[in-house]
Amino acid sequence: MLLRKILGCSLFISLTMSLAQADVKIEEVAYVDSSNQAGWWVPLSLKGDDAYFAFNSIGTSNGNHKVKIAKRDQNGDYTEGYIKNADGSHWVHNDDIGHDQPTVAVDGDGYVHVFADHHSDTDGFRYFRSESPESVAKIKRNTDIGFSSGQYTYPVATTAPDGDVYVIVRDVSGEDIGKGLLFRWDTNTQIWSLLTTFASQTNTRVYPDDVAVDENGDVHIIWEWSYDHPRADRHYGSYVKYEPDTGKTRTADGTEVASPVTLSTQGIFYQGLESGESFTSNNVGKGLQSAKLALGEGNRPSVVYRYRTNNTSNGSRDYEVFHIRWNGDSWVDRTSLFSTQDTIAALGHTLVGNRVRTYYVSDDKQIRVAEKNGDGSWSHYSIAPNKHIERIRVQTKNTGLDVVYATAPTEVSFTEGKLYALFAGDDLSTDIPLPASPNPVNASVSNGNDITITWSSVSNADYYEREYRSATSNWAWTYRKTYTAPQTSVTYTNQPARTSEYRVRACNDTGCSPWNTSNRINVSVPIPISPNPVNASVSNGNDITITWSSVSNADYYEREYRSATSNWAWTYRKTYTAPQTSVTYTNQPARTSEYRVRACNDTGCSPWNTSNRINVSVPIPIS
């Protein structure tokens, strides 16, 4: 099915926009399932002027997804197709964020190769290939890849200059659990083969990060290691080069090493353990999480990676973005590019001539780019300011244009998001400055349960974004709302009882300011008024019924009793959940008594209200 750039198309909307940057364009590609997010994956492949986007699409229920491939041709037109089982039915798989996402690579003949939904499964590769070159209409599962005994996770693929496809992946099958493997699709023979186990060590797991093939056919690989079992915080950022023609593995300086390499192999680390860093720690302290690779002059590796520098932290996103490169003799110019807020496990790295770029996503869901200047300093840009991006993949066309796969998996709802394509040329500069943060941001309560948020007006702001957090959201920021400038306040009426905070930032086409957070406020449900009236009555000679009026905001009612037997002291407190407003006690003994009732909620209880006095008499004996 061919889909033109028509706003409102039910499946694809390719809405082209020019941002404030002189040479950046963004297209809205598709709606995606909320599971369409990972840090390791390769959901983008380029062939000539065509771009192929792989993504998790909405499934048959909220807990699963289908996988689609969208092809964008040189005219900007899209075609799309589902990957399918061998019998032609749609492939459907349960959601697993961070694991079950698709990787795509298009070989030199134009055949589309897809690896989808791998997480240490026992059925080998979940591999799909198009029946026709440069077509996404029929992409079906194939078993001719072999190696069905493996249990694979994190397939990372690339297409070599000669058209062959290379895949690195972790395999946890067999005694050598957690090893890293390298496979190749040979376009001449159309056969998959296992080239080498590039990394393995007892009681460790390999985390594949990236793979690139140079014009000589040499394969460059980077990865991380975790101790004993899967961990979010990894260590020992590693690099090797594998030569398919000779079968040799080399370090960055060209030294031949035995394959598979281990943690004892000399010269493989671009990021070793730092002081205070523990390889065996359980996700606490210094460590790595995700990295990407680019090749510079002389095919020297350049790496961007996220590294936590705090010795005691265990936050899921508190990683800085670093860049390091090999200069021919050693790893040099290690630079922290971003540390002002947390980052998401998504990176991109491109190197075109002297143009060096690092793409990353900050915790406020903004795509940011650090570009190296001629003097060695770095300039910083935001290139999708009003999109809630969480994961990216970046590749460079032969023309030098960076193509950015950018997924905003929950931009529509908790279960659905959008996929964008960005096209970044040489000029990322802008004449519109980033707005400053609104200061102050104030929250106040009026009329008991009306909340008003106010913030200062900011120059160059086109709109403001507001988020909220409270105990009901586990103090996570949520419920983002947008308000067009010059609006600088909003009121929410009749709010439920809660303690909450709000934060606001200012935005324009260049990007958004840092957030500024309000004071913490408390909305309490008012104490209910007293039930009025409270009546007591006697029926059937010795049955007592107590009734009281219903009261707004009451969660429950309390009742007490007194009589001569209690020396007219209030006693025997009972609780009745709203909306109950009466109770009957049968066969009561003879007495004169009174009852009182009050209304209560979490804030407190009303004053008591007392019933009329009633008398239960001893019945006259029968003859």
Image: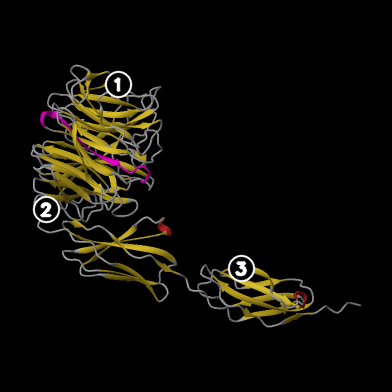
Single out the residue that lies furthest toward the right.
623
Mark 2: secondary structure: loop
Residue carrying label 2: 21
Label 3 neighbourhood size at 10 Å, few (<14), some (14-19), many (20+)?
some
Residue 5: x and y in percent read: 15, 51
Lower position in the chain sequence, tag 2 or tag 1: 2
Would you say residue 106 sits in the magenta stretch? no
Question: Which residue shows up at 34% across the image and 51% down it?
Answer: 415
Mark 3: secondary structure: strand
Single out the residue that lies furthest toward the front.
275
Lower position in the chain sequence, tag 3 or tag 1: 1
Residue carrying label 1: 260
Separation (CA) of disc 2 from disc 3: 65 Å
In the rendered structure, which amino acid carries the disc numbered 2? Answer: Gln
Residue 90, visible in the rendered structure: no
The residue range painted magenta reads: 297-315
Residue 186: x and y in percent read: 20, 23
In the rendered structure, which amino acid carries the disc numbered 3? Answer: Tyr
Name above or below for residue 619 compared with residue 173.
below
Disc assigned to residue 613: none
Would you say residue 310 sits in the magenta stretch? yes
Mark 2 or 3, which is nearer the eye?
A: 2
Which quarter shows the C terminus?
A: bottom right
Lower position in the chain sequence, tag 2 or tag 3: 2
Label 1 neighbourhood size at 10 Å, few (<14), some (14-19), many (20+)?
some
Mark 1: secondary structure: loop
Question: Which residue shows up at 68% across the image and 83% down it?
Answer: 612
Residue carrying label 3: 576
| Of 319 and 406, the residue lying toward us | 319
Question: Which residue shows up at 26% across the image and 36% down it?
Answer: 103
